[in-house]
Amino acid sequence: MFKSLSRRVYQVASLSSQMANLYQNLSLSLHFWKTKNLTKAHHTKQPHSPQPTAHTRKSHPAQSPRTPRILVMSLGRAGGCSQYTFKLLECFHIPYVLYQTKYAITEEWQENAIHITTYYHNRLSFMINTFCILPFYFLKILFQAKHYDVLLLPYFHFWNLAFIVAFRLRRKRVVLIEHDGVVHPGEGYPFQQSLVNLCLKYATEIIFLTHFVQSRISQHLIANKKVHIIPHGLYDFAGLETKTKPYSKHPTILFFGRVNFYKGIDLLLEALSTIPPHLYHLLIIAGKSSVHYDHSHIPKNKIKIIDKFLSQEEIAEVFNQSHILIMPYIEASQSGVASVGIANCIPTICTDVGGLKEQFRLDSNGELCALLCDPKPESIAKSLYTLLNDKTLYEKLSQNLSVRSKELSWDNIAKQIQNILISEGGGGIQ
């Protein structure tokens, strides 16, 4: 048994090294290609083109711009980023071709997509398929890239870099939507941040979801690129109530999303332990947990834990029955949880970290439609106590969230991104 385990560890380590070399070679290939083309352009003399005179000048009928041929890659199996992609594509009015992993969950399966083999959720599958299958897809996309004008990558994936290189070798545009910029603490593989940086470096145009995310990126990675800030749209799942919330004297408090280290679940539980139990009905913690947290100091009849990935129907259900959303994050770039909360018009308490404030600020007057606090138990408790006892504040927050939800409609978001995709110059070929 020990020998078998040792052999497995050796295989994973070997494949990891080979995969790192593969990405390094792809990156070097693009670097040498750029250097070669710049050198060639420097030494090549441009032929003299005489200016047209009154006798030679001809008028040409105006031609309408051709609709760009767009390839979209969505290779994630599930989660907020893939949901973001399909909400966006639902509102597109321009044609596109979609590549999707064949391992996508049923809820997010797209019948009109071209389904490809990526990898499942275990690390050995990731290593083997990256080393054995990705090179085949790289060559395939390198050949097919000549039929497209632009590659749209709506979120980070470990295979993105290979497809960026394929399009850049064909001198094609690559539009990358960057959600985080910096890998969250305690998440990802050791080399993940390096891949994120390479994708940013070699994309021709970048869309950030918040100014905060852009500020975290080293400027040399985005120099000479066209950069846009387009906020995250709403997750208005089927069945999710989108009208303003009524005030409740005994509200249900909700923590929703993956329970990771940086989500601050311990801060919330410590804060709630100082709130008299008779002031609230229930705390719901809904989302798959990857960390252990102690909730023994919360009365058993006051807490409900749903430790799993929720379906869209289940997400709508927990939001509809809740009255206050709490996001006690220690660190954040922006949040898909906030996008559900805004759509649901549920008054929210969130820590003033990362780009969360941007998501909750009204475009019309700059007013905040959430209660901000510090990532400390006493600050969270103070904000919660305030919201529990102030009906006027509660109703105002819910009303402002209704206004914000209209500003973040997917039609509006999709229109902005489509304008980028159909622009002739884009960010230029770097």
Image (cartoon, rainbow, N blue to C red):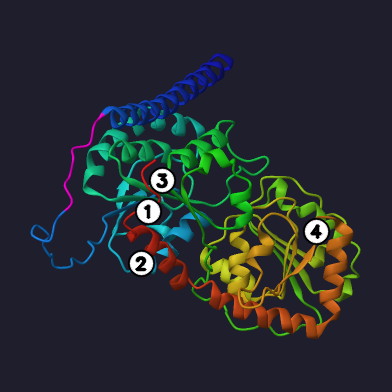
Pick whichever, 135 or 218, lies toward us.
218
Q: Residue at x 35, y 28 (%)?
A: 132
Q: Which mark is residue 426?
A: 1
Q: Which mark is residue 204?
A: 3
Q: Residue at x 83, y 62 (%)?
A: 380
Q: Which kind of residue does numbered mark 3 sit on? A: Thr
Pick whichever, 42 or 410, lies toward us.
42
Closer to the N terminus: mark 4 or mark 1?
4
Image coords of residue 175 (percent x, y)? 41, 50
Name the quadrant containing residue 58. Answer: bottom left
Q: Label 4, on which residue?
A: 268
Image coords of residue 256 (percent x, y)? 66, 61
What segment is highlighted magenta in the picture? 44-51
Closer to the N terminus: mark 3 or mark 2?
2
Cα distance in 3D space between marks 4 and 3: 41 Å
Pick whichever, 302 or 241, lies toward us.
241
Mark 1 or 2, closer to the camera: 1
